[in-house]
Image (cartoon, rainbow, N blue to C red):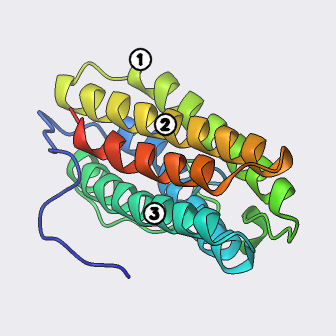
Amino acid sequence: MYNYRKRFFYPIHVERSDPNLAKLLLEHYGGKDGELTQVLQYLNHQSNMSNRVLRELLGLIAAEELAHLETLATVIGKLSGEAISYVSSDGLPWNIDYVNQNMDPATMLKADIALEIRSRVLFEKQMSQTADPGVKRLLGFLARREGIHQNLLKRSHKTLTEGGSPEQYMEIIYDYKMSLQVLD
């Protein structure tokens, strides 16, 4: 299902090193609400989701979050000039307990929505902590993508809990795919 492409999901332009910002961005790399947590949580929820269309959506989002993880690794490396590992901005190693492993479909989607909200808010906060226009644009882009995921997951939760039609589910997949056509 996953394909590797040589080019990044979004262009990466870093004007100068900024080890302090690199340290803050580690929260998205190996922190509790970071991209690694998102990837693994979506893959876990996808494996346990009974609705086939929601399984597809979770797989699509997991693949995108994996691209975000790769992008952040590159940005952090350029900002710090150092190798990075899966630790938070406080230096704490990533932990499997960060991943919500609930098995109830509605509860899984609520946990995914909450994770997207926390990630988006953190990206928005970090945008104000850099003057580098390329990094600022990238963080804004990532925040917008998390917002798109959040909205799609909210619609999925509503459709699921209200007993939506197959057409409503397919519209969510269509909207996700269309959101990729209008990338900045």
Q: Is residue 81 above or below residue 104?
A: above
The residue that mark 3 highlights is 60
- Residue 148, labelled with which disc? 2
The residue that mark 1 highlights is 128
How many numbered discs, if any? 3
The residue mark sitting in front, 2 or 1, is 2
What's the residue type where badge 3 is placed?
A: Leu
95 left or right, relative to 180: right
- Who is closer to the viewer here, 78 or 157? 157
Q: Give the image location of residue 182, x and y in percent.
A: 24, 35
Cα distance between the residues tagged 2 and 1: 21 Å
Q: At numbered mark 3, what does the secondary structure look like: helix, strand or loop?
A: helix
Q: Is residue 83 above or below residue 115?
A: below
- Who is closer to the viewer here, 108 or 27? 108
Q: Give the image location of residue 154, x and y in percent.
A: 68, 39
Q: Is residue 127 above or below residue 90?
A: above
Q: Which of the two discs, 1 and 3, labels the residue nearer the N terminus?
A: 3
The residue mark sitting in front, 1 or 3, is 3
State whether residue 55 appears in this view: yes
17 left or right, relative to 1: left
